[in-house]
């Protein structure tokens, strides 16, 4: 990978990088499209990073479909697929980790305590290997975006972070490699997650308080998606991920939602912007 990158850089090619854990879907491919459009060579990595899973999470079970993934990337004319193994990323005795404080203390960070240290560490390592000019991340994982942006800024990494919009299935469920775990009933009810987010966005823009928009959404979820167990539904500052009580007087914010359907956790969010 290093040699390939050196060759590209020596002829002034702009390098775009899309880090993934594989089981690729249209969400990932939309980031590939962005990179293909804006750069001279695109590197996609597939690495199911063990350090971002807690014991008992779905690391072993995480879908691994590398042959299908490779086929999709060939169709997209991606120049490089980087498939490191865990020993290559974490050498024997590896002892360094990147911790982004504050942003990681709530939401996914509270529910999955070591998750973002794993994410930040592997993204830093991959950035050092791939040395991209641009790196592409999905709005779908909004807290991850905030963590990566903070890390890049704090560590003066010479990489521009580009965020792609959330790609949704028909019916508006945010695409995720984990959607394949859903039963028909769970899938049907999970469509409500995005719908309540759209509704909250419209309510906030129209001047409804977050408190009442939230309680209406929770009511709707418990009535129309009774099997969903909501972990959180909150309004946050998009950069710091600190909770906000209200949208009044603000231009932007993000409403974040996580819910469990059986053993499957689904995340979604909506960026709210006053125009
Ligand atoms: P993952 O393979 O789940 O680690 O995701 C790799 C990248 O794809 C991350 O930057 C995700 O935020 C992004 N991504 C995942 N799902 C979607 C989606 N539905 N729309 C846009 N980007 C996504």
Image: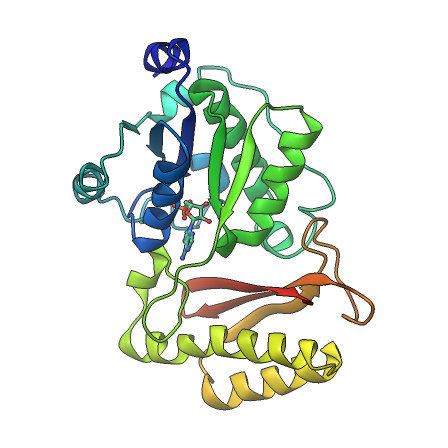
Closest to the observer, 135 or 240 = 135
Q: Which residue is drawn at 75% across and 61% down?
A: 243
Closest to the observer, 5 or 244 = 5
The quadrant in which the N terminus is found is top left
Instruction: Give above or below for 194 relative to 254.
Output: below
Is any part of residue 90 visible from this angle?
no
Is any part of residue 212 visible from this angle?
yes
Answer with the quarter of the image where residue 249 lies: bottom right
Q: Which colour scheme is used?
A: rainbow
142 vs 184, left or right, is: right
Q: Residue at x 38, y 50 (%)?
A: 58
Count of labels shown? 0
The quadrant in which the C terminus is found is bottom right
Closest to the observer, 259 or 215 = 215
Instruction: Give above or below for 66 relative to 199.
Output: above
Instruction: Give above or below for 138 relative to 50.
Output: below
In the image, residue 64 lies at what x, y percent? 26, 44
Answer with the quarter of the image where residue 220 lies: bottom right
182 vs 137, left or right, is: left
135 vs 64, left or right, is: right
Instruction: Give above or below for 155 relative to 115.
Output: above
Q: Residue at x 72, y 49 (%)?
A: 240
In the image, residue 266 lies at what x, y percent? 45, 63
In the image, residue 137 lies at what x, y percent? 48, 44
Q: Which residue lies furthest to the bottom in this view?
A: 223
In the image, residue 121 lies at what x, y percent? 55, 30
């Amino acid at each position: 990978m290093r040699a390939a990158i050196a060759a590209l850089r020596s002829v002034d090619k702009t390098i775009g990088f899309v880090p993934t854990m594989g089981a690729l879907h249209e969400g990932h491919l939309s980031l590939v499209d962005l990179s293909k459009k804006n750069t001279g060579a695109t590197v996609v990595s597939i690495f199911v990073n063990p350090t971002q899973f807690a014991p008992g999470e779905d690391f072993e079970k995480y879908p691994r479909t590398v042959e299908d993934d490779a086929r999709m990337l060939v169709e997209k004319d991606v120049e490089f697929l980087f498939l490191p193994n865990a020993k290559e990323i974490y050498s024997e005795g590896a002892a360094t980790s990147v911790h982004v404080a504050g942003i990681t203390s709530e939401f996914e960070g509270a529910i999955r305590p070591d998750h973002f240290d794993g994410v930040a560490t592997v993204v830093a390592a991959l950035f050092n290997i791939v040395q991209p000019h641009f790196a592409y991340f999905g709005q779908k994982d909004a807290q991850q975006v905030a963590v990566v942006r903070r890390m890049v800024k704090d560590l003066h990494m010479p990489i521009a972070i580009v965020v792609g919009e959330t790609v949704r299935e028909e019916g508006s469920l945010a695409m995720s490699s984990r959607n394949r775990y859903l039963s028909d009933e769970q899938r049907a009810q999970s469509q409500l997650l995005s719908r309540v987010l759209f509704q909250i966005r419209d309510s906030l823009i129209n001047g409804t308080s977050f408190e009442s928009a939230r309680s209406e959404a929770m009511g709707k979820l418990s009535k129309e998606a009774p099997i969903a167990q909501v972990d959180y539904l909150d309004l946050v500052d998009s950069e710091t991920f600190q909770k906000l009580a209200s949208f009044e007087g603000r231009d932007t914010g993000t409403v974040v939602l996580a819910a469990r359907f059986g053993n499957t956790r689904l995340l979604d969010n909506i960026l709210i912007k006053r125009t």
